[in-house]
Amino acid sequence: MGTEIGITYYDLQGNTCVSNRMMVYSDGSISAVWTFAPDATASYPGRGTGYNHSSDGGDTWLPIPTARLEAFRTGWPNIGKTTDGAEVDPTHSATKGNLCITTDGGATWTSKDIGDAVLGLIWPRLYVNGNTIHIIANSTTSTPYHGFAQGALVYMKSTNNGDTWTTPIIPTGLDTSNYCASTSFVDRFSMAGKGNTIAIVYGAPFRTPCLVKSTDNGDHWSYTEIIHQPPSVKKFDTEGSQVFDINGDHQQDNILW
């Protein structure tokens, strides 16, 4: 029989992939987060991060929380800790990315922006290496972002607890050279790391599944196809009207995934 550490009325904890929601730290303590909602009110206005912590390896936990960490509606939390002891929880709000952070062991939490409303980051993923906070997320700009009509998958990092962030970039290969303009990354990505090595995996129907990797703490990236597809398939526009004749028989082909 497990131990109940939290509740929620918000059942959709992920659209496809799920972020890092539980961390076991080197001292044996454990922190867990989830998308929390205190009730089933329409649109879940009380939605945010549910957080609990165990300082003894999971034997005992803090009381089950009855409120979110943030002062406003958020979703899709992650959890990690810097070498200096700050616990960080990136989420998204209605308009932009948000970093919820505590530097006093969870007694108080504050929120900081990740990007702005123009970039509109959503569905973040987190990796923490030392005091560097790494984030990938889907941009949701109202106009095409670097050729993507529905936003791109972008990477940023911070070395000062989220006070400032590097300029958002699209990691090598996750651009329109490999994906058509109508590609929607929509929560279909994961990120993990060990030391200075960071790995991002992405995959979706009609899209080339790939591994994007950095071995220098996010400064440079390499792109590897997990399943190779011919150019006519890899950039197949599921939202467009392009006709495909892959086998050259002058007949439109049906592409199955």
Image: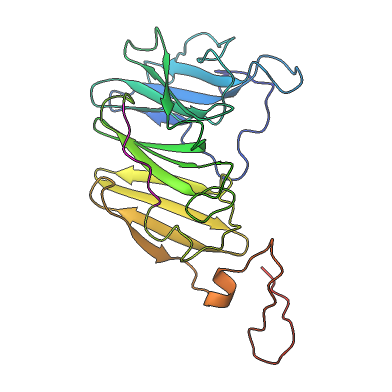
Residue positioned most to the front: 143
Residue 86: x and y in percent read: 31, 20
Residue 7: x and y in percent read: 62, 18
Residue situated in front as seen by the camera: 75 or 192: 75
Q: Is residue 108 above or below residue 223?
A: above
Q: Quadrant of residue 26?
A: top left
| 78 displayed left or right of 12 | left
Residue situated in front as seen by the camera: 136 or 103: 136
Residue situated in front as seen by the camera: 14 or 161: 161
Residue 242: x and y in percent read: 68, 72
Residues rendered magenta in the picture: 164-170
Query: At 37% across and 47% down in the image, what residue appears?
Result: 169
Colour scheme shown: rainbow
The stretch drawn in magenta includes residue 168: yes
The stretch drawn in magenta includes residue 251: no
Image quadrant for the C terminus?
bottom right
Query: At 53% across and 21% down in the image, what residue appears?
Result: 49
Q: Is residue 9 above or below residue 205?
A: above
Image quadrant for the N terminus?
top right
| 48 displayed left or right of 53 | right
